[in-house]
Amino acid sequence: MRKLGHYSHLVLYPRVQQSLVLLALIIESTIFISNAAFGQTTADGTIHGQVTDSSGAALPNVNIVAHSMTVGGTFKAVSDPEGNYRLTELPPSIDYTVETEVPGFEKIQRTGLIVRAGLNVTVDFELKVGSTGQTVEVSGEAPLIDTQSAEQATNLSGELLRSVPITGRHDWSDSLQITPGIISASSDAEGGQTYFLRGSENENHATLLDGMDIGSFEQNWPSNTISIANESLGDIQTKTGANDASSPAAMGMVINLASPVGADQYHGSVYYLIGPASFNGNNVPNGNAAASASQQPDFSIGGPIKKQRAWFFFSGRYIHRDDGISQTAGQTAYLKEIYPAFSSFPNESRGFVFLGNSSVQLGTRHRLMGIAQYDSRKQDANYQWYTQDIAKSEFGGGAYGLRLISQWTPRLTTRFLVSYNNKGVNSSLSAIGGVGSKPEEDIYLTATQSAGTLVGQGASLATLNNLSSVSVNPAQKESITGDVTYYIPRAVGTHELAAGFYLQPHELSKVTSYYANGGGIVQEDAALNNPNDPTQGYTVFHTHSVNGTSSFLSSYIGANDYAWYIQDRWHPIPRLSITAGLRPDWISGRDAQFKVTTQHSWNWAPRVGGAYVLTKDQRNVVRASWTKITDITNASYLGTAANSTVTTTDIYYNPDGSIFGTPITTPGNTSSFLGKTFDPNRHQGYVREWLVGYRTQLRGEVAIDVSYIDREYRDRPAMYDTNQIYTTTDGQTVWGGLVNPALNNTYYVTNNKWNWFVYQGIEVSVSKQTRALQLFSTYTYSPNHLAGGFQPEDPTAIIEPTKFANNAGVGSVRGYVTNDWTGDTRNRMWQRNQSRTGVTWNAPWKLRLSTAFTAQSGTPGGPVITTLAALGTPYDGQYGPATLKIDGRTVSNPLATTYRFQYKDRGTGQIWCPWLLQWNVLVGREFHITERQTVEANLNIYNVTNNGAAQQFVNGNNSASATFGELQNVQLPRSAQIGLRYHF
């Protein structure tokens, strides 16, 4: 074999004879912006390029063969009349070898090629006349930037996630922690992380495993309803912008996980992780830290069922983790003074998760793959103010799929996949320990009058007894997808045409609620007798009863999503690539309980993008895109035809125990009085996105990407009350009663065309790779604002019409969220600054030193509000009486609210959480037993400085509360874990 260094006109890659693990870290830590494989979102990658002779003339009919030691089977292609070839549907691997063979020319062999999930790799060949018996091996510097696509995507390997200290959970979702454009925060109840992309919510993401949708229709929270061990990961691709038409509907990320596949040689690993409680620090003086104690054994094994024909992979993990509940010194003091028996306790997580697949080569043209993934874990979900372990939850479920890939000719490829998942929350009442026998009791500092009722000021200081109700929420999602890709070499340039369908015909989410206390009084609210001394007890000021209902079907939501797409990737000239496509989704939502259609709509999503290579060396590229992205179907966003199905009674009490006002009865909904009507033109919300960027590769293997992204979140779900009678005389509006006396509220459900969120961000990514040192770093700056005005019939717009302006805490894209006094606008997805840096050094003596540093600016507290009592001007009836007797019952006046914005508008005077800083380090060493067997030992240390930044405000934005400005949910303290991994 003859070896060459740099060879003209070739895309060059380094050899991988030295440390496959190191090379995976090098490549994956530096590929931030990648080119998605054409066609329906896939777990496989593509190698393509052009074959020419020494004069640059195209060589047709060249046989191209690819194979990998870690992937079963071989993959073949033949160059077309233009010399172009395409090796498609390649399972991810870091050691592909591609060989050329044609009579009269030397054979060229490229080794160490890396294929990633959804990634195109360009490899050109220049053949010299000679004997096919002579093989030429080519090596050289690897290109680091994509030259063909406008898409923004991050490709990471499972090996990278197993080697960098990201989070102590070692879960697949750790990859999102190091993805540019992502805002992350720890959950304040279930533990783990929540992830937001450029203003999208935690449930706006689509998560695919080997192409099958494994996201829960109930909520789509990727890091909680899906648990996959790192040993089960081959690759992860996360699309964050400029998605082409083949990508499924989702306003957030499109996450594609690729599981490892078996090969003709057995391979596997055993990993044991331990992080004792004694390894944790405490970053909450006089309080309780969110310290985690864990033991997690993992395993994986893959290999041949029949060599060259069928292969398998199987992996699993047992989760045994105790997550501390973050409680500040103030919260801990209240809990102990209100409930003297209080002692801190963790949220426990227990469960077994596994993943398996099998691949079969059906002849030379067809490859069949079966996939099964299961995760079901018990996870306590107690909040900071719970005095006892009263919140039991169960997350997860199964996902199963079958995929057939066929390459009929070098130009024609088809794919077909059918899958099912039943991921939900709380599969049965017994799984979460049943329902409580007492009313839930919530203790507040004080209570105040508002709209003829009494409400607690600020957040609850303590919750006693048990929860007022628990819910069982099984869900399911079926998917049938297929697509065809056809390559045209000569038609004013080259074209890759694709068309496909994406059918989800039977999405269901069923919620059954079970009430505590036998369905009598299920909740009591109380205020301290002396706000300055909680030990003097408390007095109940409000009881809430469901009048004997012990359980009921609270929602039963169904949906269908029938989508198709067409797309063309056109290369009119070699330096220019244009991708244009259309993705319509026909989405139908229904309330299966009341047999009401809640939505029937076509949702049209055109998408176009382009990339242009500025220089001949292909190291400077500009790109731009315009996309309209429909939101994913989600049970909570589609909603129900009724707000409640149970009649409730609320009674309020003075401090002496006498009844305050008149008991308020809220009628339950029936098929005759649903309480909602639906806009016949209602449709899914969508993102309108512009993206422009510049990519360059500098000497020393430094790659830089600079992007500007402009996103508008349009037509979000909205509903407004149509049952109130408002009369305006001489510029003064008063409330006059109800249109329908049988109901308190009736709502019109539509799309929010009155206000929309605007995200404008600048993202910079820098990476460098050498054999010894790998570095990646990103920075995002994203000011944002809320455009438009108040929604119709919003009492806030009637009382304070000039105070809409907002440029900080702007709210949530979730369904039916208003932006008035009580709207939760302290959402953590709107942080303005975030930076992430990771460094891995392959040190002498087989040591590995790694570090990861994250910095995120704090969350705004939302528009600052106060109460009339605090302003010294109690409600005096200027908007009508506080309550009216209507149809024999007392009804509250919405305009009698005592809330007001404290400043000139909603954007002024907001307070901010502190910056969140996290520094993690890893020290490890690898020991070689044999050529194929290694043992790795490592020490992970998280939050080295023991920083204690709180990530949320206690009560958000009510300055009239004594707890205004107090913080909670402190980041995890310093902790350490020891890991031992045997690999063969």
Image (cartoon, grey):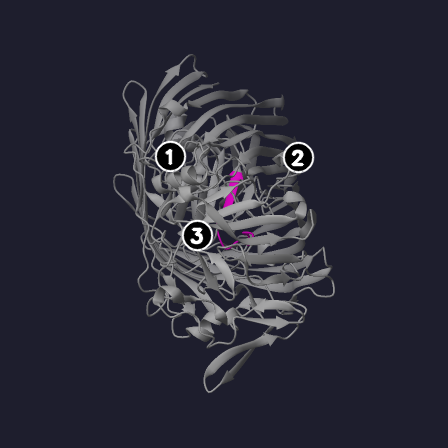
| Residue 247 is inside the magenta segment | yes
Q: Residue furthest bottom?
A: 730
Residue of label 3: 149
Image height check: is 307 above or below 769?
above
* Dot 3 alpha-carbon crowd within 10 angstroms: few under 14, some 14 to 19, many 20 or more: many
Amino acid type, mark 1: Ala
Q: Residue 620 at x, y = what percent?
A: 32, 51
On screen, 43 above or below 454?
Answer: above
Using the image, tell me which numbered label, if any, was put on residue 15. Answer: none
- At label 2, the amino acid type is Ser
Q: Using the image, tell me which numbered label, if any, was put on residue 289.
A: 1
Residue 96 seen in the current view: no
The relative height of residue 955 versus residue 680 in the rendered view (above or below) is: above
Q: Position of residue 824 (x, y in %)?
A: 45, 57
Residue range highlighted in magenta: 246-257
In the foreground, 149 or 554? 554
The answer to whether residue 236 is seen in the rendering is yes
Front-most of residues 874 and 759? 874
Q: Judge by depth and name the residue closer to the eye, 345 or 380.
A: 345
Secondary structure of the residue carrying numbered label 3: loop
- Pick whichever, 414 or 260, lies toward us: 260
Q: Position of residue 339 (x, y in %)?
A: 46, 38
Sequence order check, earlier mark of 3 and 2: 3
